[in-house]
DNA sequence: TCTTTAAATCATAATGATTACGAATTACAT
DNA sequence: ATGTAATTCGTAATCATTATGATTTAAAGA
């Protein structure tokens, strides 16, 4: 996912290109596929747009997540967001708890265990690995 | 894990057997290995002890988790707790999002992917499957 | 049983993340 | 340039969780 693709996607749906929204996308691009908590996003945005409130942040983050521009997870009780990975198929992530950066893990455990859940309706699953990336070690 | 084992464990560490604490354990036992959110635990306890406050709930839940009597996870932004499973080795869970009940899944994906994380320090991982159990379908 | 004391609870307030809302502003199609 | 719906701003409300000081209680020992 990148900025131009995201903005086009929004334009198609009738959403406007605001400078705040553009800046949010830029910050995700600068973060290079890492997860960012909502609070950090607010602080970053406010360097350029001091008046921005949480309302703008969350409204945009959720909008972008609904449009599959972002994906989200919950780390230590805080929602984190990142650009949606659309270069691979379905996959999971190692997440560095120091910097938020991720590494794709292609293996999905559901392939191995689905047959053991006969009679159960599976709606979703979460597989995440937490630790320190080489750069943070 | 069961009530007597838990109470003995606490007694060894010098913790007291209070009626509120005992009731918390009973509620977990009644729940039959399902996850319970803190809020539900408060409501349940208050049927017997109307004066109980969140302080008592959280203090006890965290104490019990520290002592490995409970295990916890975060579902939809709320902390949930359950009796710690000590009948198997390391394993994961299917969690019914309707009733909180769980089914053990013996497979751990870390066995398959650890070698692909060379150079990364793995501290923790989470693998959970969400859906509806046969009883709730 | 009585006393002592640390542990635990109670009542309430503080914190922090998230959500909500009315008024004002802005993007953009016509 | 204008109209209109989308968006933002400023601020308040909500919700889960954590913290605190005063009071009560469990349990060990005399």
Image (cartoon, coloured by chain):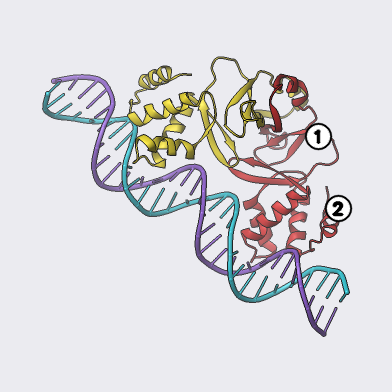
Chain colours: A red, B yellow, C cyan, D purple
Q: Residues within 10 Å of mark 2 (few under 14, many from 20)?
A: few
- Kind of element beneath mark 1: loop
Do marks 2 and 1 share a subunit?
yes
The subunit carrying tag 1 is A
* Separation of residues labelled 2 and 1 (CA atoms): 20 Å
Q: Secondary structure at mark 2?
A: helix
Q: Is residue B22 left or right of residue B137?
A: left
Side (left or right) of A132 relative to B54: right
Residue B131 vs residue D29, the one in the foreground: B131
| Viewer can see residue B118 | no
| Image quadrant where residue A75 sits | top right
Q: How many marks?
A: 2
Residue B106 coordinates in the image, percent (x, y): 66, 18
Query: Looking at the picture, does residue B116 appear above or below residue A20?
Result: above
From what the image shows, is residue B74 above or below residue B84? Answer: below
Residue at the spot x=60%, y=25% of the render?
B102
Given the image, what chain letter belongs to the residue carrying mark 2? A
Residue depicted at x 42% and y 36%: B57
Checking the image for residue A5, the label placed there is 2
Image location of residue B30, percent across then percent down: 47, 25
Where residue B97 sits, quadrant-wise, is top right
Picture disc at residue A90: 1
**Percent position (x, y) of residue B104?**
62, 21
Mark 2 or mark 1: which comes first in sequence?
Answer: 2
Residue A123 in the figure: left or right of residue D21 = right
Q: Nearer the viewer, residue A108 or B67?
A: A108
């Amino acid at each position: 996912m990148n900025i131009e693709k995201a903005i086009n996607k929004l334009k198609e749906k009738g959403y406007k290109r605001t400078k705040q929204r553009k800046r949010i996308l830029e910050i995700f691009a600068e973060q290079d596929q890492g997860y960012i908590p909502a609070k950090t996003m607010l602080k970053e945005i406010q360097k350029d747009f001091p008046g921005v409130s949480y309302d703008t942040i969350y409204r945009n983050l959720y909008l972008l997540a609904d449009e599959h521009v972002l994906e989200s997870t919950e780390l230590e009780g805080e929602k984190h967001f990142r650009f949606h990975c659309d270069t691979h198929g379905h996959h999971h992530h190692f997440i560095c708890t120091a910097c938020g950066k991720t590494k794709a893990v292609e293996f999905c455990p559901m392939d191995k265990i689905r047959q053991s859940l006969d009679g159960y309706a599976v709606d979703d699953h979460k597989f995440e690995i937490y630790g320190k990336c080489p750069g943070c070690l």
